[in-house]
């Protein structure tokens, strides 16, 4: 089979190479799948660079999230059959950027009523947004939600889920095209950080109250601005550091405004409390079945276009999600 493989760490455009590999065979509690669509995620970029918290041995095939069709089941697998269409996380080093991949059987879930591309992007971004807003921040009716990088993959999911819950949403974006995307997602207020004074706008639109829940996948300099936008007894949820700098927030500021900074490593729930992931999946599947979830997919990449797609994602030039097809 054909696969994109990382043999030497570096920038994604140079790290991934087309390779011919044997079909992967599932181990115990794994399934092998024919990849129908694979989502591009920031962890894929970080893995190529050797900067992710999970550092697989070289060589490996990235692609942490996908939709596929089961072609073989490993020892001990129950409730999964050859021919089933499933979504979820891959089992690195046999990731989704290949014609065939492996998945942990417990994570290979029946997809919601979505096409292959939309199903492929349902797991990481939407589960992260759901857990951040409703488990970590305990979002309450009527509270203002501020979403950083609102036109990105996980940010767009957070905007949609907050709006579905009936909360007013402020979207922070960079550039006119991303601003238009955020408006189409349903954000009540869109602030272009490249032209607007973010802090002043947030204060104005909330009547000086500030944002009750702030969703931050960027960190760094962006966080420094967001901390000035949080309401009294607000919550800032940190879900990533795509900005490149891990901030060290001054704790005296938390004390002065009585707010909380919360962390979310969504994947760790699989180890510590897998029932949380199951709860999130059930909730998201119900929304998808009602047609209320519409993933923002801005690019569908052919086999040879993967390096360019990872480069766009790393540079923050993509809107919504990018998906990759092994057969195109």
Image: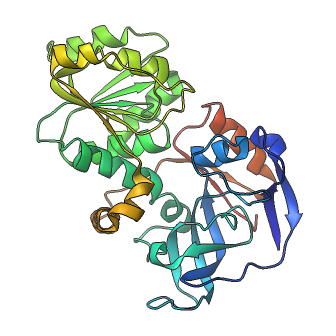
Left or right, residue 51 beside residue 261: right
Q: Quadrant of residue 123?
A: bottom left
Front-lying residue, 294 or 215 = 215
Quadrant where the N terminus sits is: bottom right
Is 94 left or right of 122, judged from the image as shown? right
Identify which residue is drawn at 29% across, 13% down: 228
Using the image, determine if residue 6 lies above or below residue 191.
below
> Who's the residue at 53% across and 28% down the image?
177
x then y, percent, for residue 63: 65, 58
Residue 44, relative to residue 151: is it above or below?
Answer: below
The answer to which quarter of the image holds residue 98 is bottom right
Seen at 65% across and 35% down, the residue is: 314
Residue 145 or residue 9, whichever sits in front: 9
Is residue 294 among what the camera can see? Answer: no
Q: Position of residue 248 (x, y in %)?
A: 42, 21
Q: In the figure, is residue 223 to the left or right of 256?
A: right
Instruction: Identify the image quadrant of the C terminus.
Output: bottom right
The residue depicted at 57 percent of the width and 27 percent of the height is 244
């Amino acid at each position: 089979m054909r696969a994109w493989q990382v043999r030497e760490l570096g920038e994604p455009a140079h790290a991934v190479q087309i390779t011919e590999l044997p079909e992967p065979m599932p181990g115990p509690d794994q399934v092998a799948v024919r990849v129908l669509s694979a989502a591009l995620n920031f962890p894929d970029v970080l893995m190529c660079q050797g900067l992710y918290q999970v550092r697989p041995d070289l060589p490996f095939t990235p692609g942490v999230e996908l939709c596929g069709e089961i072609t073989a089941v490993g020892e001990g697998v129950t409730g999964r059959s050859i021919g089933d269409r499933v979504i979820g996380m891959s089992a690195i080093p046999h990731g989704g950027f290949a014609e065939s991949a492996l998945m942990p059987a417990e994570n290979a879930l029946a997809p919601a009523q979505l096409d292959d591309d939309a199903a492929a992007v349902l797991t990481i971004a939407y589960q992260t947004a759901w857990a951040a807003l409703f488990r970590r921040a305990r979002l309450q009716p009527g509270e203002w939600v501020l979403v950083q990088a609102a036109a990105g993959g996980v940010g767009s999911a957070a905007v949609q889920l907050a709006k579905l819950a009936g909360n007013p949403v402020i979207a922070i974006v960079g550039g006119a095209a991303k601003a238009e995307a955020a408006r189409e997602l349903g954000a009540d207020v869109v602030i272009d950080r490249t032209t607007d004074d973010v802090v002043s706008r947030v204060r104005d639109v909330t009547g000086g109250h500030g944002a009750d829940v702030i969703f931050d996948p960027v960190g760094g300099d962006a966080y420094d601005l967001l901390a000035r936008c949080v309401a009294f007894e607000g919550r800032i949820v940190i879900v990533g550091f795509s900005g490149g700098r891990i901030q060290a927030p001054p704790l005296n500021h938390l004390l002065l405004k009585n707010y909380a900074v919360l962390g979310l490593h969504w994947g760790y729930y699989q180890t510590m409390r897998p029932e949380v992931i199951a709860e999130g999946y059930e909730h998201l599947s119900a929304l998808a079945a009602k047609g209320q979830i519409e993933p923002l997919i801005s690019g569908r990449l052919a086999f040879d276009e993967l390096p360019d797609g990872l480069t766009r994602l790393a540079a923050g030039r993509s809107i919504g999600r990018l998906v990759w097809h092994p057969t195109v």
